[in-house]
Amino acid sequence: MAGQLVEVNGATIRGDQAMSTLFGHKKGAFTGAATDRPGLLKAADGGVLFLDEIGELGLDEQAMLLRAIEEKQFMPVGSDDSTSSDFQLIAGTNRDLTTDVAAGRFREDLLARINLWTFHLPGLAERRDDIDPNLDFELARFAESAGRKVSMNKESRTRFLAFAADPTTTWRGNFRDLNAAVTRMATLATGGRIGIEQVDEEIARLRDNWGAGRTEPGDSDHQTVLASLLRPEQIDDIDHFDRVQLAEVIRVCRRSKSLSAAGRELFQASRLAKQRPNDADRLRKYLKKFGLRWEHLQTNC
């Protein structure tokens, strides 16, 4: 199409402002309407309107939008005459619009009209292979905005990427989290290079922001259990499978009165096959693999 690409986020406009922003208004339509305003639908005439967070629009705006899509006609606020615009609509949402239709928050007829092609854009947690190249992209963005170049040494980059790729790393804020993380590390970097210290501090900060730091060591969050005993870099060096197993061993040890009692619980099935089971020694050797001792677990409850 020959026209321009016009973008608007439905979450940033409400009520009369939404109507005016999308469909325009006539001079004097409301207080502050000193001049005519064509609106974004008119600006997209002959082009594309990208309406992000369409599920945030009110029902009145949805009704107006449906008419504009179907008839290519709409009424600016305060006008008695229709205006026209022929545009292609691309809508985005992070809501389940089918659920919103059932709840009366979204028009069923509008959903049926716009739901021609649907594409799911996975979040960062589902696109972990994209983190490595985007790390360079975010560093370049920081250099442009801050006016100074910052890099990462190999060890720091390897540690951050290991954390980023870990299944327990949620990336709840998607690329906003990654952007903020790189910005913080780059800002705190000394000598123009992000080191292990900045990476470890950022890993701890992200985990705390995502809630890991607000749960109790004895709960079901194995990441929190390990964090109460091990440094972030030590946890990152342990396979995910082993983390879950080690966390459960630690929980059993903490609620047991002795090393032998913990061993009996942990090896309850396999010990039956041994004539002289030494559960305490077996548990002691397991903990030693991760640099832990029974005494250490008891003092860190």
Image: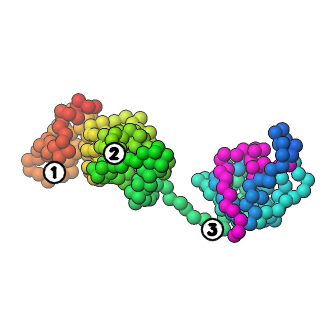
Residue 245 in view of the camera: no
Callout 3 crowding tier (Cα within 10 Å): few <14, some 14–19, many ≥20: few
Give the number of the mark in front: 2 or 1. 2
The residue segment tinted magenta is 1-26
Q: Residue 278 location, x and y as percent?
A: 11, 44
Q: Which residue is drawn at 29% across and 52% down?
A: 154
Camera-nearest residue between 201 and 193: 193
Q: Which residue is drawn at 26% across and 31% down?
A: 300
Farthest residue in the bottom direction? 1
Q: Residue 225 location, x and y as percent?
A: 31, 39
Q: Residue 128 location, x and y as percent?
A: 41, 57
Name the residue type under label 2: Arg
Can you identify the residue that label 3 sits on?
117
241, above or below 278, in the image: below
Callout 2 touching callout 3 (CB < 8 Å): no
Q: Distance between the residues labelled 2 and 1?
A: 56 Å
Whichever of callouts 2 and 1 sits on the residue coming sooner in the sequence is 2
Camera-nearest residue between 44 and 112: 44
Can you identify the residue that label 1 sits on?
272
Name the residue type under label 1: Leu
Q: Quadrant of residue 208?
A: top left
Disc 3 on helix, strand or loop?
loop
Split into 4 quadrants, where in the image is the C terminus?
A: top left
Can you identify the residue that label 2 sits on?
193
Farthest residue in the front direction? 147
Q: How far apart are marks 2 and 3 (CA)?
A: 45 Å
Give the number of the mark in front: 2 or 3. 2
Camera-nearest residue between 218 and 153: 153
Whichever of callouts 2 and 3 sits on the residue coming sooner in the sequence is 3
